[in-house]
Amino acid sequence: LIREHSSASAKSTPMHTLAMLLGALAPLSYSLQRGAVSTASRGLARGKGRASHLYGCAAEPGARTRFAPSPTGSLHVGGARTALFSWLWARQNGGQFIIRIEDTDTARSTRASEQEVLADLSWLGLEHDEGPTAGGPDTPYRQSERMQTGLYQELAQQLVDSGAAYPCFCTQEELDAKRQAAEAAGEDPKYDGTWRDADAGEVARRMAAGEPYTVRFKVPPGKKVKIDDAVRGEVEWDVEATVGDFILLRSGGMPVYNFCVAVDDAKMRISTVIRAEEHLTNTVRQVLILEALGFPLPRFAHLSLVLGEDRSKLSKRHGATSVTQFKEQGYLPQAMLNYLCLLGWNDSTDKEIYSVDELVAAFSINRVTKSPAVFDIKKLNWINGQHLRALPEAERAELVGSHLASAGVAKDAHSAFAAAASKMVAEKIELVNDASPLVRDVLAYPLGETLSSAAAAKLGGDLRAVCAALVAAHKAGQLPDGAGADFEAEWKAAVKRMGEALGLKGKSLFMPLRVAVTGRLAGPEVADQVKVLALAADGAVCEAVPFGQRMEQLEKALEAMQAPVEA
């Protein structure tokens, strides 16, 4: 077993190889632990004490987590965070991360949406161990396909046979009338139990006659359900007072959502269920189903909502909300993971930038807060910029070059021009997509507009002196070739000579020089801009003002500058 897992671990990061080995040795102890959880949970339901130590957040060798998206649209960042936390917990404990597609909403679920969600998870690096594309021992992993196996109907009948569920022959009209009467009386419109203790002979007669019926769960009188949620702490429900006898199978045999989820989590041996807080109310039904079927209860961790900056639920009106949108806008997957993990979690330090391996090592469910997290796009941009600058230069050049080519700035993503542009913008951009407008600005030369500004006027005589010296040096052939191999060193030496000749240094030299060369008061390093401009002749697609033309414009502007009036 160790030998087999060691081979698999060779593909894993060193930080969790030990945890993976422990996970490989865990099946027996894990089964015992799960049995203990089940026993303790049943005792808890009977009011015989708490089992918080079993619901705690200590290491869980062999943990099995799942992400169960409904393929009705793009992957929302809130869902991506849920998937990330589930993936991290599984990876940290050498377990398995399972993808299960909950596609029973046939009117809205599409295979195209499923593929988009899976592609987004793959782009983020959240590869699954079992699922619709990876396969696994619990196939199929699409709920619609699992329905075709008769699994849910078989277990519903098991509950009926054990007395934990019963057929209900109420028509929709009858149920509507009951609900309206309850609402009129100011009561909770839950099912009144008409068929709960019906005569067995009457039930058999109606079934024999082929009358449609639903299957309802029989909630035990006075029943209470309590869980020790890893995020929210103890949560308790008075079941009879809140949910009543709920439906497991609709007429025609279609299982309802909560029944499917409870059964699938049990059959797939999910040990920890990490999901959004909107599913908290579903937990009571799922716990009742699991207990009645004799399945062990998983751990639960319900994550708070992700809010917009106005503290309302994050939605399209706040801007990009799907993983696909962020990918298209030039965000890095590792930066997205870093930021999503910080939405409701921290490791009790001031650290904000994490690699994926560092997240695997540091993450713990008990550090997840139950307070809502606010999605701060400025913070995400800053984190993305940190990750972008931390990339090896060649990798960053590949990303920026590809973007410049697709944005119609560079002819070739791998050209010398694209590489120089990538180096030039590295310290100025937070997103890859920020590169193209910045490079376009560098290739333009808005000298006239800048010279007419109040900021340029403050440069006074220093600006005129530097402009004159630069034009003279250009005409004399004393400026280095921007495409030359030693350009940076040669440019630095030329600027130093100019400063010494003019008696200028520091800001008095460099600010006028920036205006003269680039036509702007701010931007990337001047030497980097000159190099990019030189390489643009062969590498750029968009319009550029060559250095020679700039000097011609500068000379004309210099002629128009008025000499200071002497006192």
Image: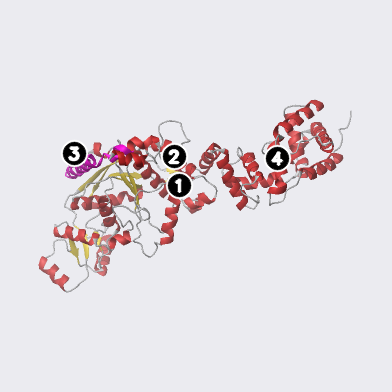
Residue type (three-letter) at the residue carrying disc 2: Val
Residue type (three-letter) at the residue carrying disc 3: Gly
Label 2, secondary structure: give it.
helix
Residue designated by label 3: 49
Query: How far is disc 2 from disc 3 in space, using C-alphas?
Result: 39 Å
Residue designated by label 4: 531
Number of numbered labels in the structure image: 4
Label 3, secondary structure: give it.
loop
In magenta segment, residue 34: yes
Query: How far is disc 4 from disc 1 in space, using C-alphas?
Result: 35 Å
Please tell me whether mark 4 or mark 2 is closer to you in this view. Answer: 4
Kindly indicate whether the residue at mark 2 contacts the one at mark 1 (C-beta within 8 angstroms).
no
Q: Residue furthest bottom?
A: 209
- Provide residue 364's location: percent of width, then percent of height: 36, 37
Query: What range of the chain is rendered magenta?
Result: 20-47
Please tell me whether mark 2 or mark 3 is closer to you in this view. Answer: 2
Magenta highlight: main SS: helix
Query: How far is disc 4 from disc 2 in space, using C-alphas?
Result: 35 Å
Q: Which mark is residue 124?
A: 1
Residue type (three-letter) at the residue carrying disc 4: Lys
Residue designated by label 2: 356
